[in-house]
Image (cartoon, rainbow, N blue to C red):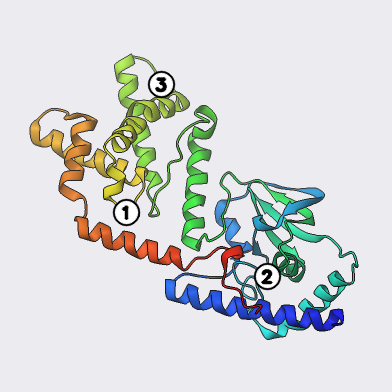
């Protein structure tokens, strides 16, 4: 079979596999497309620089500047008008011709294609691991990831802003990430730190600097509660939530218990009492886990996808 015909067969198989994956994504109720590069602005890049041409891992390419809707999450072509371009690139590859480097933006550990979407699609379809790319790197604190929704990116942008304000990643580089499942929560954390800074200054009878307050708050308030959450496996009782979510709820609950009893009840009692009164019932938790499991069953990896080559 001549190379052009082989390339045409390959693109037909690729589009059939794209259709299968799209059906699975509809059943799961999830998106199945590349991340738009425009979303990166929500991560608030601080600068960019040209890095030259280097080989990059193809699996780290998760988005596109302007063709994100034309390919699925695995860079399979979704539209028939892409076929001829795809065939020409595959044909050149089969003939052993060298293809030019693609152009990408790098944000954290992820890459977004500026030019060369079809070359990435063909290369990924052939299980190629690396591809040469001309790189422009954006300086972001938090990296986007494959499968992120716009909501996920906005949440990461909020976390990046929080780190910029607190310098927690600098003063506590080994800190456990403070991640929320809903937007607008970091302002509450900042209020906690400011309140802690004030009372710490009262206790020590001196001014407490911002970075000192951040470290003290993390060590004596946030991490103490997180340790209680981990010790008693509280997070297992709140599917879809995070340790940071629970921290805020437990601290609020601790305040109300203290008001009720007239004395601080401590983090352990507040944690256990909160879980006892507000955790979803066992059947609600089981239902949530079954839904998550079922979605995972339909999210097959590239190498395990049902074969359409036969």
Q: Residue furthest top?
A: 205
- Label 1 or label 3, whichever lies nearer to me, is 1
In the rendered view of the protein, which quadrant contains the C terminus?
bottom right
Looking at the image, residue 70 lies above or below residue 177: below
**Horizontal and vertical percent position of residue 214:** 43, 29
- 205 with respect to 24 (left or right): left
Q: Badge 2 is on which residue?
A: 66
Q: Badge 3 is on which residue?
A: 208
Q: Secondary structure at mark 3?
A: loop
Q: Residue at x 9, y 30 (%)?
A: 262
In the depicted view, which residue is nearer to us: 160 or 81? 81
In the depicted view, which residue is nearer to us: 54 or 11? 11
Callout 2: 10 Å neighbours few (<14), some, many (20+)? some
Q: State which tag comes first along the sequence, 1 or 3.
A: 3
Q: Quadrant of residue 217?
A: top left
Looking at the image, residue 302 lies above or below residue 182: below
Q: Badge 1 is on which residue?
A: 239
- Label 3 or label 2, whichever lies nearer to me, is 2
Q: CA distance from mark 1 to mark 2?
A: 35 Å
């Amino acid at each position: 079979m001549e190379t052009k015909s082989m390339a045409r067969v390959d693109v037909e198989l690729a589009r059939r596999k794209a259709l299968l994956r799209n059906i699975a994504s509809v059943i799961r109720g999830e998106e199945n497309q590349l991340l738009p590069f425009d979303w990166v602005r929500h991560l608030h890049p601080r600068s960019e620089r040209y890095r030259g041409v280097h080989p990059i891992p193809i699996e780290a390419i998760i988005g596109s500047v302007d063709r994100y809707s034309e390919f699925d999450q695995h860079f399979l072509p979704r539209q028939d008008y892409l076929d001829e371009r795809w065939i020409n690139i595959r044909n050149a590859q089969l003939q052993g011709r060298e293809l030019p480097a693609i152009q990408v933006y790098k944000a954290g550990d992820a890459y977004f294609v500026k030019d060369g979407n079809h070359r990435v699609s063909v290369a990924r379809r052939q299980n190629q691991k690396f591809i040469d790319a001309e790189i422009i790197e954006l300086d972001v604190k938090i990296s986007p990831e494959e499968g992120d929704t716009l909501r996920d990116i906005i949440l990461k942008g909020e976390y990046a802003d929080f780190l910029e304000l607190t310098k927690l990643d600098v003063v506590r580089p080994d800190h456990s990430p403070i991640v929320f499942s809903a937007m607008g929560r970091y302002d509450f954390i900042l209020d906690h730190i400011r309140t802690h800074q004030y009372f710490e200054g009262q206790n020590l009878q001196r001014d407490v600097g911002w970075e000192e307050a951040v470290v003290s708050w993390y060590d004596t308030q946030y991490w103490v509660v997180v340790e209680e959450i981990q010790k008693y496996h509280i997070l297992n009782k709140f599917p879809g939530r995070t340790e940071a979510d629970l921290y805020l709820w437990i601290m609020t609950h601790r305040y109300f218990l203290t008001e009720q009893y007239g004395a601080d009840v401590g983090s352990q009692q507040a944690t256990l009492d909160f879980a006892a009164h507000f955790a979803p019932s066992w059947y609600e938790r089981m239902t949530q886990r079954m839904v998550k499991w079922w979605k995972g069953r339909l999210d097959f990896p590239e190498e395990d996808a049902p074969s359409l080559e036969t």
